[in-house]
Image (cartoon, rainbow, N blue to C red):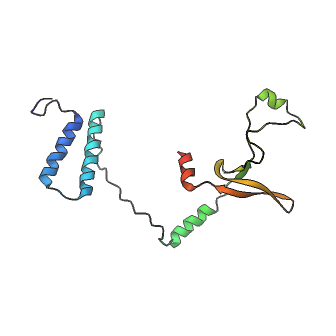
Amino acid sequence: MSEDGEGLDDWEAAMAEQAEAEASEGGGDPQDDIDAIMNAQAAGDNVADGAQAADGAQRAELDELQEDAPITVAEKKKLDTILDIPVTISMEVGRSEISIRNLLQLNQGSVVELDRVAGEPLDVLVNGTLIAHGEVVVINDKFGIRLTDVISQVERIKKLR
């Protein structure tokens, strides 16, 4: 790298440009500093890839989430629409993989070994996504399931990614 600035890679050039801009501004808001660094990184990445920065790009301003914020009538109407969507809930006792040959040989009285131990909780799935574990109960001669462990929303979201 020479002393007159030739030979600077794109990153160094962007950082030097940022330092010059900061020196001419004389300080300011810390958010401006973060924005300048991000813009310098984006400019460095774009130059390195041979692309130019898109004109008209704007920073999106997002509202802060508030847990205690009251629900407006319009939001309640949207929520009611979502709450009426039907979903399929199923309970899974266990799973097994068998070949098609063995599947075709199954008949009345055949036993298929599952991957669960007797007494282990069942999986409760909604549209194929695990949401809870539970145990079988009988109420008025009908089977039901008592939820023993509900998967947290954070864990469910992690599984989606």
Quadrant occupied by the N terminus: top left
Q: Is residue 5 left or right of residue 43?
A: left
Residue at 75% over, 46% down: 93
Q: x, y (%) of residue 56?
A: 29, 50
Task: Report how many numbered discs are placed on residues in the image.
Answer: 0
* Residue farthest along the left direction in this orientation: 4
Residue at 30% over, 44% down: 54
* Nearest to the observer: residue 161 or residue 72: 161
Q: x, y (%) of residue 5?
A: 12, 34
Q: Is residue 128 left or right of residue 33?
A: right
* Residue farthest along the top direction in this orientation: 101
41 relative to 132, above or below:
above
2 relative to 139, above or below:
above
Q: x, y (%) of residue 98?
A: 76, 31
135 relative to 104, above or below:
below
86 relative to 99, above or below:
below
Q: x, y (%) of residue 159?
A: 56, 46
* Nearest to the observer: residue 57 or residue 124: 124
Identify the image quadrant of residue 46.
top left
Q: Is residue 154 left or right of residue 25?
A: right
Q: Is residue 29 left or right of residue 26?
A: right
* Residue farthest along the right direction in this orientation: 108
Identify the image quadrant of residue 9.
top left
